[in-house]
Image: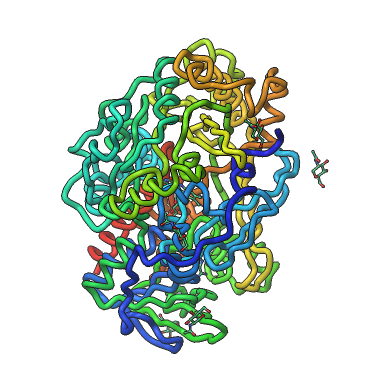
Amino acid sequence: MLLSIHAVVVTFLGICASLSAATPLHLRDDHIGAPQDATFDYIVVGGGTTGLTVAARLSEHASVAVIEAGGYYQITYGNNSVVPLYSLTRIDAIDPSPQFPRRPEIDWELVTVPQTNAFNRTVHYAQGKTLGGSSAFNTMSYLRSTSSAYQRWASMVGDNDYTFKSLLPFFKKSVRLTPPNLEKRNSANATPEYDPSAYGDGSPLDVSWNNFVDPTLTWLAKSLQAIGIPINPKGFSSGELKGGAWLPSTIDPAHATRESSQTSFLDYADANTQIKVYPYSIAVRVLFENETATGVSVDTNGTIYTLSATKEVIVSAGVFNSPKLLMLSGIGPTEVLTSFDIPVVANLPGVGQNLQDPTSINVANFVNTPNAQSIVANPATEPEALRKYVEEAAGPYSSAAGYISYERLPDDLRQTLPPATLAKFDNFPSDFPDSQYIVGTFVMANGSSMGAISSTFTRTFSRGSVTLASADYKDNPLIDLGWFSDPADADVLIAGVKRVRQAWSSEPALTIRLGAEVLPGDTVDTDEEILSYIKNNGNQLWHASSTCSMGKAGDKSAVVDSKGRVFGVKGLRVADLSVVPYALPGHCQANAYALGEKIARDIIDAR
Ligand SMILES: Cc1cc2nc3c(=O)[nH]c(=O)nc-3n(C[C@H](O)[C@H](O)[C@H](O)COP(=O)(O)OP(=O)(O)OC[C@H]3O[C@@H](n4cnc5c(N)ncnc54)[C@H](O)[C@@H]3O)c2cc1C
Ligand SMILES: *[C@@H]1O[C@H](CO)[C@@H](O)[C@H](O)[C@H]1NC(C)=O
Ligand SMILES: *[C@@H]1O[C@H](CO)[C@@H](O)[C@H](O)[C@H]1NC(C)=O
Ligand SMILES: *[C@@H]1O[C@H](CO)[C@@H](O)[C@H](O)[C@H]1NC(C)=O
Ligand SMILES: *[C@@H]1O[C@H](CO)[C@@H](O)[C@H](O)[C@H]1NC(C)=O
Ligand SMILES: *[C@@H]1O[C@H](CO)[C@@H](O)[C@H](O)[C@H]1NC(C)=O
């Protein structure tokens, strides 16, 4: 079978469901901006994960406008983005294949250039084009990176604000944690362990544990424990990524609905501030007078007008669109700007460079245990699942991702890595994990259940880039993910596949496993065969970062300083995953929310 897991899943996705009224939509009429010139203290470009966090916090103190290309995903995409299980089965917009279904109402439809080190594959890279941004269709896992990873960030940018200790108050500020509901989870094999001191009394972002445990996942979790990766009693929010954890998710536990930056921060700001939102509106360019940002040119359904900022413009358009907008505004590598006749405001060669995108590979088998998807795919069990969801906010529809592990590879496998690859690890703190394993389950059209364990490297050596395709703001940028441009990434994935196969050969896995390995399959055996399989089938986790990297003054590749201020100009910041200076281990959304809190604080303190 040559299909990747994602391709398998999307081939039998149903037609998009229409709107369910599960989530009330709140934006007040007088909080929706009319398409005409207006002036605010702050203008935030992009109502995504980081952008709505920044905007909501700034609007506690000042007048704020948010420019967002999309609308409400609950309206444009029905309950696909709302029901947790659908994040795994119905969000067809995230299909990475170049034949992805077109969903312009929620996705930017970005497609990469051929990946020269991955057999010239082109990849669709889903990015949310909606209020909520990518938090509107991510898989909702909530975890943070490691203390040493944040220390590395702090050292790279010369600012101790980025140590885990300094960031922790910002992580806590957003999050309202609800402890696991053990009764609804009803699984002694999946009792979450975590460190309550990593959370405080924050709000408005709900984080909680699924009100259902996928039965197959408990076996896959046991198989990773059986090869020597025990549960970490602290979980993954205390600055450690070591061992395994049943993860919390950005889910509202009372209703078992997706929590995005829109259902949290935007709803909060709508109810408590005078925030103004410009939906279906595209930022054309940032406007400057001399070297000071004075506003943004905006296109709302074809009407072009100017929103002026008396204080600052904050660009939160995401890892691909923030560098694009900077370049369209005259900030970027001079040779790129002049080739498109864009007047240069600041020559910053780092804009669009340093793209880092960790990739992963699945090892999958048929299993004899049910999973959340197979239960709802079965006409005999679906009605009870739906009842449980609607009446109790529980059951398989209420659950999404679940269990992740991190480890330093065992010595015998580590020794199979080329010395040049091991030597590159020396540029990272010694307690960095080597590999991440994510367990997942799937159901085939004929009802067969499948289990998958993916492996991902946690240090990203390959580098890609984003540049302009044209000077037209309606065109998507040219994206080269640079996949496998550094061979060290694939080396670690090869070892990861071997390690995951050990888990699949452990006693708990053999209890549920049926037949020969499905993916990659028994014919993929030697290192060369695994490498080729990885290049053909490796997938993104949608964790791309670092295209407007933060750095020290004088560092020619840096785009923003440690407070997000764009070098070479005044009144302009970038706040989103593009400024994180390297791909942190762990997942991204917790960092996006905390960064939003932190940059908002910097802006408020600077007034
Ligand atoms: C499929 C998928 C699964 C994921 N799973 C997880 C997970 O389980 N856990 C996790 O931690 N992370 C996950 N992530 C990653 C995480 O969601 C993202 O890294 C994070 O949301 C990015 O936040 P951001 O603020 O940088 O950008 P975004 O949230 O993407 O926000 C950018 C916003 O800017 C808007 N915009 C862009 N250009 C313009 C313009 N010119 N004018 C107006 N508006 C514009 C966009 O429409 C968007 O709303 C996943 C991501 C995806 C896509
Ligand atoms: C999602 O919406 C569709 C169409 O309205 C409906 O049939 C389905 O039951 C909904 N799913 C859930 C889990 O509520
Ligand atoms: C990828 O494309 C380049 C440029 O067209 C070509 O030179 C190269 O041979 C291709 N590689 C593969 C593996 O097809
Ligand atoms: C821009 O420069 C001109 C000429 O030096 C000056 O008159 C004007 O006030 C400046 N504008 C701003 C916003 O600084
Ligand atoms: C812009 O278009 C969207 C989608 O068609 C529509 O919902 C919205 O009301 C329009 N906005 C304005 C200001 O015309
Ligand atoms: C179900 O379909 C898959 C391919 O889609 C096939 O590999 C598998 O053998 C089938 N299972 C059964 C029980 O027929």
Q: Residue at x 48, y 17 (%)?
A: 511
Report the residue at 24% width, 65% height from top: 604
Quick check: 214 left or right of 506? left
Of 199 and 136, which appears nearest the observer? 136
Dividing the picture into quadrants, the one containing residue 235 is top left
- In front: 567, or 85? 85
Residues 75 and 271: in front is: 75
Q: Quadrant of residue 275?
A: bottom left
Relative to 393, residue 494 above or below: above
Of all residues, the one furthest to the front in this rendering is 380
Quarter in which the C terminus is drawn: bottom left
For the N terminus, the image quarter is top right
On screen, residue 554 above or below 22:
above
The extreme bottom residue here reads 36
The answer to whether 166 appears left or right of 116 in the picture is: left
Q: Quadrant of ligand 4?
A: bottom left
As drawn, the residue found furthest toward the top would be 412
